[in-house]
Image (spheres, rainbow, N blue to C red):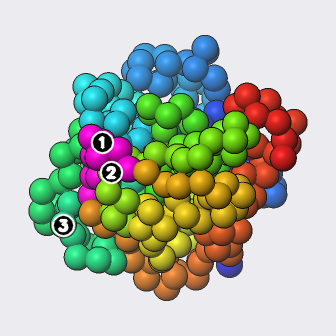
Amino acid sequence: MSIYNLQGKRVWVAGHRGMVGSAIVRRLEQEDCEILTVGRDTVDLANQAQTSEWIMENRPQAVFLAAAKVGGILANDTRPAEFLYENLMIESNIIDASYRAGVEKLLFLGSSCIYPKFAEQPIKEEALLTGSLEPTNEWYAIAKIAGIKLTQAYRKQYGCDFISAMPTNLYGPGDNFDLNSSHVLPALLRKAHEAKMRGEKEITIWGTGTPRREFLHADDCADALVFLMKNYSNDGHVNVGSGDDISILELAVLICKIVGFEGDIKHDLSKPDGTPRKLMSAQKLGALGWKTSSTLPQGIESFYQDEFLKDDDRFNGRPV
Ligand code: GFB
């Protein structure tokens, strides 16, 4: 028996065109609920009046707040104003309008970069605000911390059933493959695939390759988020991860193996490493009754199939 029943509910996925939002929509199709979405061409979620008007008119009962400005280490480091301003606006507009429209339940999505740069690993939820942030993404992190605090404040002052989940580094269908703004996993998959197609002898990864990261497929993340929507109601945020991490060099080797690229891996040391390690504790979510169903090699394999080996000439390559 779940705490919150989605059956027959009007459920809004804010950010449904993004990687996580689209995964939530796919997952919600298995639930007996009505899925609401609205495109950027109709409502600019950074605009308070437009957002509020849409929510008042459409009256969602549950909201997944997956709309955000996101990017990899370089985008975060070079566009701090956009990452801070747009994320603050989107989350403030949606959370406040949801309260005013009487939304029954809202799930806000943060990110593992909210934790201190040198947090004890695996990072427990309690590590929030116990140390300084990683400078390359502190702008995004501050906006996401504000989002967690907004859900807690609206719960405390107005009794809203608003909760927060902090996903680890995610990848999956709909991911960003632009090499300047993407995250590491899609970037390396693209680099390895293109190098193989062009018969090149090497690929270049950023930094030393020693930082460690935890990865989760967006479909597994969406499953955890729907689980939390149904089964969690408290003010503390919940980590959503796989519970395992891997070094960036090990990830590059794994990706090359999956793609079948046999050349060398070089390093571009002019690019930042960022946080040395980011592995979140999966204990709290595990105790609630959820754990991931796929391994990292399985997840990357299916991601590679979905994005590169279907009808693809998107990356100037031929299907293998
Ligand atoms: O995924 P990523 O961009 O973000 O980089 P973060 C992770 C690690 O992979 C860094 C290295 O050490 C990068 O230097 N890396 C190696 C690469 N090759 C590449 C490459 O070709 N592209 C990219 N992008 N990285 C982001 C934050 O941090 O994580 C966001 O900036 C957010 O705010 C997100 O939290 C989940 O894990 O370092």
SS under mark 1: loop
Regarding residue 138, the answer to whether it shows in the image is yes
Q: Residue furthest bottom?
A: 287
Asked whether mark 1 and ligand 1 are closer than 8 Å, the reply comes as yes
Residue that appears at 78% across and 48% down: 306
Q: Residues within 10 Å of mark 1 (few under 14, many from 20)?
A: few
Residue range (magenta): 267-275
**Mark 2 is on which residue type?**
Gly
Q: Which residue is mark 2?
A: 207
Assign the N terminus to one quadrant of the image: bottom right
Residue 175 percent coordinates (x, y): 60, 41
Along the line of sight, the residue nearer the viewer: 309 or 217: 309
Real-space Cα distance between discs 1 and 3?
A: 20 Å
Q: In the rendered image of this protein, does residue 94 appear above or below residue 303?
A: above
Name the amino acid type tagged 3.
Answer: Phe
Question: In terms of image quadrants, where is residue 18?
Answer: top right
